Image (cartoon, helix red, strand yellow):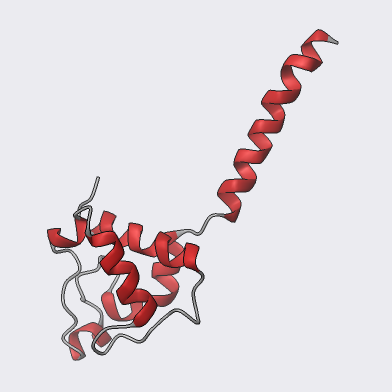
Amino acid sequence: MRLALVLLPIVTLTILASAARADGADGGAVWAQHCQACHGATGAGESPAGKAMHVASLKDPKWASADAQAKIESAVRNGVGKMPAMASALSADQITAVAQYLQQLAGAK
């Protein structure tokens, strides 16, 4: 009985943590589905569409800076230049996740 009382909170927390991760958006998956066609797998704009539209490289270290997160999220949400607004296609969590993923591509730790 004592063992069950000790294990119950541990098992419960483990299950809750798994559920939280499952509900969280996967920035890499969002990138692959919505961004990669133009920006390329690495963010350098190396895709055929990216080359045709002269997409700027997102590997620039400026995108890895701490203050870039809000700028990236705004660009994804509202669009910029030839990039369409994604606010109607992505949830707020997905926008945040893909912005964080882009920052990793740009070299953020």
Q: Nearer the viewer, residue 72 or 21?
A: 72
80 or 53: nearer the viewer? 80
Q: Which residue is rendered at x = 20% and y = 68% of the image?
A: 58
Left or right of 44, for residue 40 = right
Q: Residue at x 13, y 64 (%)?
A: 60
Please name whichever residue, 81 or 74, is drawn nearer the observer in this view of the structure. Answer: 74
Residue placed farthest to the top in the image? 2
- List x then y, in percent, for residue 69: 29, 60
Q: Is residue 29 above or below residue 35?
A: above
Q: Is residue 87 above or below residue 65?
A: below
84 with respect to 5 (left or right)? left
The answer to which image quadrant residue 52 occupies is: bottom left
Question: Which residue is at a point 20% across and 62% down the rendered structure image?
Answer: 63
Instruction: Return the residue nearer the eye: 46 or 88.
Output: 88
Looking at the picture, how far across and down is residue 5, in whole percent? Answer: 79, 16
Q: Is residue 88 left or right of residue 78?
A: right
Q: Quadrant of the N terminus?
A: top right
Expressed as whole percent of the image width and height from the top left, the position of residue 96 reads 41, 62
Whole-percent x and y of residue 43? Answer: 24, 68
Residue 109: quarter of image: top left
| Count of residue discs | 0
43 w.r.t. 78: above or below:
above
Residue extending farthest right: 1
Name which quarter of the figure residue 32 lies in. Answer: bottom left
Tell me what residue is drawn at x 38 percent, y 64 percent.
98
